Amino acid sequence: MLTTKSPLVPRPARTARARLAPRLDSLTGLRFIAAFAVFTHHFTGLSARGGIAHAPVLFPYSTMGVNGVGFFFVLSGFLLTWGHRVGASAKTFYWRRVGRIWPLHLAAALPCLWVFHRWGHVPWDPLSFFASLLLVQTWLPGAVPTLPGNPVSWTLSVEVFFYLLFPLVIRAAYRLRTRSLLALAGAGLVAMWAVNWWTATHLSPSMSAWVMRNPVTRLPEFLLGLALALAIARGLPLAPRPAPVALVFAAYTVVYVHRGAWLPGTVVDQLDWTVRPFVALFSVLVIVAYAQRERAGRRGLLCTPLMVRLGAWSYAFYLLHQTVNHLILDRWGRPAPTNLSVFTLLGVATLVVGLSWAAYTYIEEPARRWWNHHQPAWGAASTSNTARTSSGASATTSLK
């Protein structure tokens, strides 16, 4: 059980957490795997006539890669909570989040004007594009196109909403017992299923898709990550092994992608409506499995310098990959479906990794450091106070 004697923390929060590790390298490596899964889904498409270069050997299992974004949401909730300091300033948190996501987002959005609209002739309107720059596009049901600006940035719009809520949510979470916290997280996943069912049966497909991209409906994924991070810090004896979780997820994926051919219609519908909650559960189990392994001193492939670097570049990889995909499609067209497309996929992925390294090295990190260096005086003061409080608390924190 995690206990702290710090008088600065409200009593229910005293067993909430300590900073159990400065960082978790394995989770950084997992970020790249999730980003690569999304890339693979976009590259191979939803059918033999879709994607950039269809590879039958990967399809239809590659379609599950779209749920990599759900993994990101769960991971975001987990990591924000894992690194949170009791008493941290909300202003400082907001300031640093802006410096973390907006500079590279803005830089990656500009090429989309040419790639998608000027060269690709995708219809658009300036208001929707401007909304995407501000990361509020997921609140607009009539955006043109459906995913304006950089199409993949819709997930950042969801992330921003959670960032706005996080300082309030984490304070409330500290005051809840672990059992209540996990129960609420489970209820959120049930609510996610219910909303998916209702929209699919009462709204048009386009409106249903918009609702299921709306930041409010994706909150349960963040909250699940938050709840498990706090529960693990409080001593929840949950330590699944990664391999069994991966095998169960692989079996689920096989059933899910073949659901139409193998199962009756009512079961197919339920699988469609529950895929996001199930992926969230698998995601949090994988995250906890690797976090617990690393805390126990067991490091593996995900902790190697290469995977950690790829994980650090994964944000740039995610923002750039679909623009590169469409540039290739517009310039050279879609080849006939063939398994040789796997080599094309790996080549394009290597190109995007190189661009991601450049974007991280020359845009993302310099901009983040500049932004943090120019933090207002109130932010610098609150950061200093939080550091002193945290160091004092850590001196009286023990894991029993």
Image: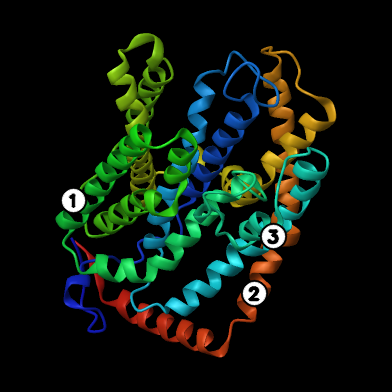
Estimate the x, y position of residue 128 in percent, counting from the top left: 64, 55
Nearer to the camera, 231 or 157: 157
**Colour basis:** rainbow
Query: Where is mark 1, residue-wise?
Result: 183
Q: Amino acid at mark 3?
A: Leu
**Residue 175 drawn at (x, y percent):** 20, 69
Name the residue located 20 percent from the left edge and 48 percent from the top edge.
237
Q: Nearer the viewer, mark 3 or mark 2?
A: 3
Q: CA distance from mark 3 to mark 1?
A: 38 Å
Tell me if label 3 and label 2 are in contact, CB under 8 Å: no
Visible in this render: residue 22? no
Which residue in the protein does label 2 denote?
Answer: 371
Q: Nearer the viewer, mark 2 or mark 1?
A: 1
Left or right, 186 with reference to 361: left
Q: Which residue is mark 3?
A: 106
Q: Position of residue 337 (x, y in %)?
A: 69, 13
In whole angstroms, how far apart are the C-alphas of marks 2 and 1? Answer: 39 Å
Question: Which of pointers 3 and 1 lies earlier in the amino acid sequence?
Answer: 3
Secondary structure of residue under mark 2:
helix
Which residue is at the far top? 261
**Badge 1 element:** helix
Tell me whether circle 3 and circle 1 mark residues in contact (CB < 8 Å).
no
Who is closer to the viewer here, 398 or 16? 16
Amino acid bearing label 2: Trp
Q: CA distance from mark 3 to mark 2?
A: 14 Å
Q: Which residue does the image show at 26% across and 76% down from the upper left?
A: 396
Secondary structure beneath label 3: helix
